[in-house]
């Protein structure tokens, strides 16, 4: 099962490190990652495998949101099916 994680906000040191470290701690594998910085604004999208997480998706999503608050960015996590439905033309 896959999820999409997005991170948006003002660029600063450590965003990728904090998110990736947390995902490793909860046994979530990063399948693909893309990040850009435009005029000081950070944007990252990750596709992750949530087949065997050590915590529920709801807890992971809440904890990622809290990490985002601490970093001053917005982190969201959506199941792949929901993401695809929302972005279908």
Image (spheres, rainbow, N blue to C red):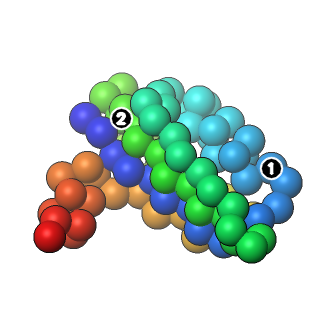
- 49 to the left or right of 62: left
- Residue 35 in the image, given as x and y percentages of width and height: 59, 51
Q: Nearer the viewer, mark 2 or mark 1?
A: 1
**Rendered-image quadrant of the C terminus:** bottom left
Rendered view: 5 above or below 72: above
**Rendered-image quadrant of the N terminus:** top left
Rendered view: 23 above or below 89: above
Which residue carries the number 2 mark? Answer: 50
- 89 to the left or right of 54: left
Q: Residues within 10 Å of mark 1 (few under 14, many from 20)?
A: few
Quadrant of residue 2 within the rendered picture? top left
- Labels in figure, total: 2
* Residue ranking furthest to the front: 39
- Residue 66 visible in rendering: no
- Residue at x-position 82% and y-position 61%: 12
* Residue ranking furthest to the right: 13
- Residue at x-position 47% and y-position 46%: 46
Depth check, front residue: 43 or 82: 43
- Residue 48 in the image, given as x and y percentages of width and height: 41, 38
Q: Cα distance, mark 2 to mark 1?
A: 23 Å
Q: Secondary structure at mark 2?
A: loop
Which residue carries the number 1 mark? Answer: 14
Q: Residues within 10 Å of mark 2 (few under 14, many from 20)?
A: many
- Residue 81 in the image, given as x and y percentages of width and height: 18, 52
Rendered view: 51 above or below 36: above
Residue 35 is marked as: none
- Residue at x-position 40% and y-position 42%: 47
- Residue 38 visible in rendering: yes
Q: Secondary structure at mark 1?
A: loop
In primary-sequence order, the first of circles 2 and 1 is 1
């Amino acid at each position: 099962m896959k999820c999409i994680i997005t991170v948006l906000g003002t660029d600063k040191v450590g965003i990728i490190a904090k998110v990736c470290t947390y995902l490793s701690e909860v046994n979530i594998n990063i399948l693909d990652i893309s990040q850009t910085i435009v005029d000081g604004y950070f944007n990252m999208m990750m596709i992750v495998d949530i087949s065997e997480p050590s915590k529920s998706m709801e807890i992971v999503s809440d904890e990622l949101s809290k990490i985002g608050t601490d970093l001053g960015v917005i982190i969201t996590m959506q199941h792949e099916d929901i993401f695809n439905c929302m972005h279908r033309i």
